[in-house]
Image (spheres, rainbow, N blue to C red):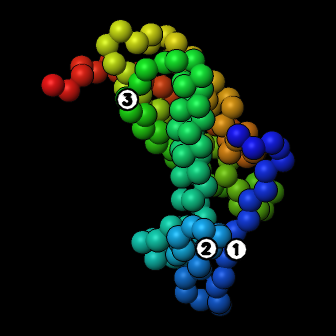
Amino acid sequence: MQPFPHRYSASATGGPEGHVLLNAEGLPLLVSAPPVEFDGPGDLWSPETLVVSAVADCFVLTFRAIARLSKLPWTTLTCQVSGTVDRIDRAAQFTALSMRASLEVPEGANEEQARRLLERAEQNCLITRSLKASCELDVVVRVVQPAL
């Protein structure tokens, strides 16, 4: 890892109507629009879906790093995130995030250690730590048989 501080840049370009183009150097262009709840088409990424996706992505990547350092064997982690946007003091903001993490581990893995590491990942996730909204984590750890 590179020393801190890290800096990230992106740009958004749009007009009075239509799509917004999201761009960052070296990355593919993303097209966004408001979600249905804000009178958008509902068929493109929106700032709201990007936020909840960033939470899910950051959680998986944080867990990957923690599990590697802890030498926990695992096969798959799926993190589903839902976010609630409400008005607080007449301004819309995320007020709550709900995360459901489903982890598959091979036979013989320490399930209690897996649960602890999932909780540590939630506590150390850069994105959730940077948001005002409260975050609730629900964990499922499943032992799976190896594929034959």
Q: Residues within 10 Å of mark 2 (few under 14, many from 20)?
A: some
Q: What's under tag 1, amino acid-wise?
A: Ser
- Measure how far apart labels 3 and 1 are at the Cα level: 35 Å
Image point 65% across, 90% down: which residue?
A: 16
Left or right of 45 in this view: 143: left
First-in-chain label (3 vs 1): 1
* 49 lies above or below 127: below
Residue annotated with mark 2: 22
First-in-chain label (2 vs 3): 2
What is the residue that sits farthest to the right in this orientation? 5
Q: What's under tag 2, amino acid-wise?
A: Leu
| Labelled disc at residue 11 | 1
Looking at the rendered structure, the secondary structure element under dot 1 is strand
Proximity of marks 2 and 1: CB atoms separated by less than 8 Å: yes
Image point 53% across, 32% down: which residue?
A: 64
Q: Quadrant of the N terminus?
A: top right
Q: What's under tag 3, amino acid-wise?
A: Thr
Q: Residues within 10 Å of mark 1 (few under 14, many from 20)?
A: few
